[in-house]
């Protein structure tokens, strides 16, 4: 999927996705020419890694 499609899917701005990418916090991407593309399976894996371990508790324990 394109970065615009991922932005819509996650309901976050495209700029946020670029920021996450630069900081290593977002899903892995693939360069196709000059365009970024995301495998749906990578997006799902990344989302699963963001999941709370317990309801109401973030990954960092807060």
Image (spheres, grey):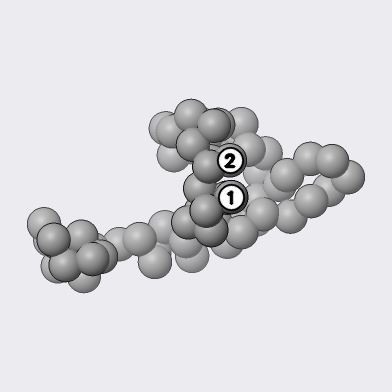
Q: Work out which quarter of the rendered image holds the C terminus and state it.
A: bottom left
Q: In the picture, which quadrant includes the N terminus?
A: top right
Total marks in image:
2
Residue occupying the point 57% across, 50% down: 21
Residue identified by numbered label 2: 18
Residue 43, image x and y in percent?
53, 55
Question: Which image quadrant for residue 42?
Answer: bottom right
Q: Position of residue 38 (x, y in %)?
A: 65, 51
For the question of whether residue 43 can be seen, the reply is no
Residue 3 seen in the current view: yes
Viewer-side residue, 58 vs 48: 58
Location of residue 59 (image quadrant): bottom left
Instruction: Where is residue 58? Give x, y as percent.
Output: 20, 60
Q: Secondary structure at mark 2?
A: helix
| Disc 1/disc 2 C-alpha distance (Å) | 6 Å
The answer to whether 53 is drawn above or below residue 35 in the figure is below
Residue drawn at x 47%, y 61% is 46
Q: Position of residue 22 (x, y in %)?
A: 58, 50
Q: Which residue is mark 1?
A: 22
- Circles 1 and 2: CB atoms closer than 8 Å: yes
* Direction front: furthest residue: 23
> Closer to the camera, 47 or 57?
57
Question: In the picture shown, does residue 25 fall above or below 1?
Answer: below
């Amino acid at each position: 999927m394109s970065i615009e499609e991922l932005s819509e899917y996650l309901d976050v701005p495209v700029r946020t996705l670029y920021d996450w990418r630069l900081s290593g916090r977002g899903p892995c991407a693939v360069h196709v020419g000059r365009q970024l593309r995301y495998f749906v399976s990578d997006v799902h894996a990344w989302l699963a890694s963001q999941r709370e371990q317990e309801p109401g508790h973030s990954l960092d324990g807060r």
